[in-house]
Image (cartoon, coloured by chain):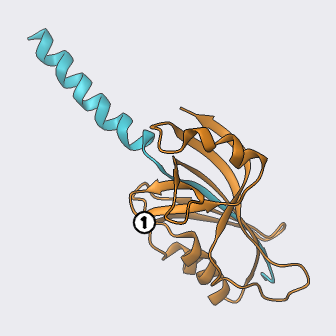
Chain colours: A orange, B cyan
Amino acid sequence: MKKHLGRQAGVQTVEVSLIDGKVDVTPKEDGQIDPAQLLKATYDSGVSVAELDMTARGKIVKDSSGSLAIQVAPNRSFVLAPNELSKELEPFVDSPTQVTVRGQLYKKPAGKKKGDTSAPLKLSILEVQKKE
Amino acid sequence: MNTKRVALLVLLGSMVVVPVAQAQIKHIEMRVEGMT
């Protein structure tokens, strides 16, 4: 799996901990990394993903459907799942403020052996680390 | 001469700072099951 993930676009390093089933991925600074692709590649390597957490820095925007999103690259943004922390970021919509957040992008549905990795990913913010 | 050096240092410094400050995915962590 480590090799499989290491070959994905935008991946710099992959650290796998067999003991606690944790996989740490450090992206390259080229902005090419795609969490959805990473999720798919992990499933393709025969391993089931229970959770995927992401730390990202970007601007808060509203997408075409009016949902709050964090834009991490000119052509890549992640819709924010509404919660208390996402409400806190609403005043920063379309402002030049860059925020760094940690959130959960994927969680396997309880009771299912295999999650649906094709569903659109929403970022559920767990922590707002920085506003600058 | 000194002004040119300072300008060059500022230019080089900004080239280092800009990639660090730009928007990006900084880290991804997955919890997986069924790994042997």
Q: Is residue A43 above or below residue A92?
A: below
* Residue depicted at 43% across the width and 57% down the height: A73
**Kind of element beneath mark 1:** loop
Q: Quadrant of the N terminus of chain A?
A: bottom right
Residue drawn at point x = 43 percent, y = 59 percent: A31
A11 left or right of A117 in image:
left
Residue A71: % across, % down: 49, 55
Q: In x, y percent, where is residue A27?
A: 51, 59
Which image quadrant for residue B10?
Answer: top left
Task: Identify the subunit bearing mark 1.
Answer: A
Quadrant for residue A108, please give it: bottom right
Q: Which residue is mark 1?
A: A32
Residue at the location (59% across, 82% down)? A41
Q: Which class describes the residues within 10 Å of circle 1: few (<14), some (14-19), or many (20+)?
A: some
Give the image quarter of residue B18: top left
Image location (x, y in percent) of residue A131: 59, 34
Of all residues, the one furthest to the left in this rendering is B1
Left or right of A46 in this view: A79: left
Q: Amino acid at mark 1?
A: Gln
Tell me: residue A72, above or below residue A113. above
Horizontal relation, residue A122 to residue A49: left or right: left
Q: Nearer the viewer, residue A75 or B1?
A: A75
